Image (cartoon, rainbow, N blue to C red):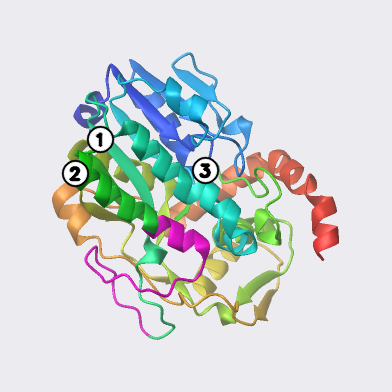
Amino acid sequence: MTREEYGLFEDKSILVVGGAGFVGSNLVRLLLSNVRNIKILIVDNLLSAEIVNVPKDERVTFVEKSVTDFRVLAQLQDNIDYVFHLATYHGNQSSIFDPIVDNENNTQTTLKLFERLKDFHNLKKVVYSSAGCSVAKKTFDAAVATTEESPIELHQDSPYSISKIIGEFYSAYYHKQYGLPVVRARFQNVYGPGEILGAGNWRGTYATIWRNVTPTFIYRALTNQEILLENGGIATRDFIFVEDICRGLMLCALKGETGDVYNIGSGIETSISELAQRIMQVTGSRSELKIMPKREWDTSGKRFASTEKSREKLGFSAKVLLQDGIEETVAWTKENMDVIQGCIEKHRKHLEFYQ
């Protein structure tokens, strides 16, 4: 993002749904740091987020409710310039455990929000956060870069993945039917500072705490616990640093073609085994790697995104190398270990029962 591009958000009103979450809070802080005159409304029910991630800034208004609440929707006024819809039910395992709650906090958030926004006239862009896993080919063989035009398979691994692609269907529908200026941003595997293990409420499984692979590996490495390599760590992912994903979201808002979709990733394939080795090297960990069987539900073995379209159309490319991103995330984790430990500890009784 250039200074001129940030300047396009000056004197604008921004709604960030899910703004207390990992990506949402980083987006809010990045906007606040680079745009002087801006108003940001955060709507987040803290189901999988923590209040500590909401910046204390007079430019920010925080509503601790779900965007599916009709009272929240009724209070939204047609003076909003940009909407970033980042609310989700985190994540795959939680959605498998309770698909009804996933529907309420994933599919319904999108449908009800779009239904409210469809007649707004001031909106310049609505950015919907989708998931690359919903489109990527289900394979443990050699991966091919997933393009924006790749076919969507009927088989999906989880209700979370289903909800994310349904959100894309609604995005396309509301754009065609009502002219809602929606742009879809397909996330790859985001990591970085601000992702708190155990954030939010207990959501039925150990994945409430061990939510994503990078923060889980970093925490376990720093505390010298076993690092579990499911399916031998042969799966691959496209890891993208959180500041890069936030820049991609903003470029979707400023330059994205309404009705279109863009991959926001690094375009680099990295194995889970390599990720673990890098993290152990950075942390100087004494952890042992433990080979585990493949997760029964997981068929999304190897994948990474094509970034050609986002580079050509948005001028987006990831800037932070994986090694640098890991080092920064490790440093943040060390500085915020008390917060992380507190969030893990609040779920202790559930973990003991679950185990």
Name the residue tied to disc 3: 22
Magenta span: helix, strand or loop, mainly?
Answer: loop
Q: Which amino acid does label 3 sit on?
A: Phe
Question: Circle 3 sits in a helix, a strand or a loop, which is it?
Answer: helix
For residue 258, which numbered disc appears in the image? Answer: 2
71 magenta-colored: no
For residue 30, which numbered disc appears in the image? Answer: none
**Total residue callouts:** 3
Q: What residue type is labelled 1?
A: Lys
Task: Find the distance from the CA under tag 1 to the CA under tag 3.
Answer: 22 Å
Mark 2 nearby-residue class (10 Å; few <14, some 14–19, many ≥20): many
> Which quadrant of the figure contains the N terminus?
top left
Q: Which is more N-terminal, label 3 or label 1?
A: 3
151 magenta-colored: yes
- Figure quadrant of residue 33: top left
Residue at 23% x, 34% y is 2
Residue 9 in the image, given as x and y percentages of width and height: 27, 25
Mark 1 nearby-residue class (10 Å; few <14, some 14–19, many ≥20): many
Residue 121 in the image, given as x and y percentages of width and height: 22, 25
Name the residue tied to disc 1: 125
Query: Which of 303 and 88 lies nearest the eye of the viewer?
Result: 88
Task: Find the distance from the CA under tag 2 to the CA under tag 3.
Answer: 25 Å
Residue at 45% x, 50% y is 107
- Figure quadrant of residue 30: top left
**In the image: residue 43, left or right of residue 136:** right
Q: What residue type is labelled 2?
A: Thr
Residues in magenta, as a range? 142-165
**In the image: residue 24, left or right of residue 34:** right
Q: In this view, does 141 lie above or below 161?
A: below
Label pair 2/1, CB-CB below 8 angstroms = yes
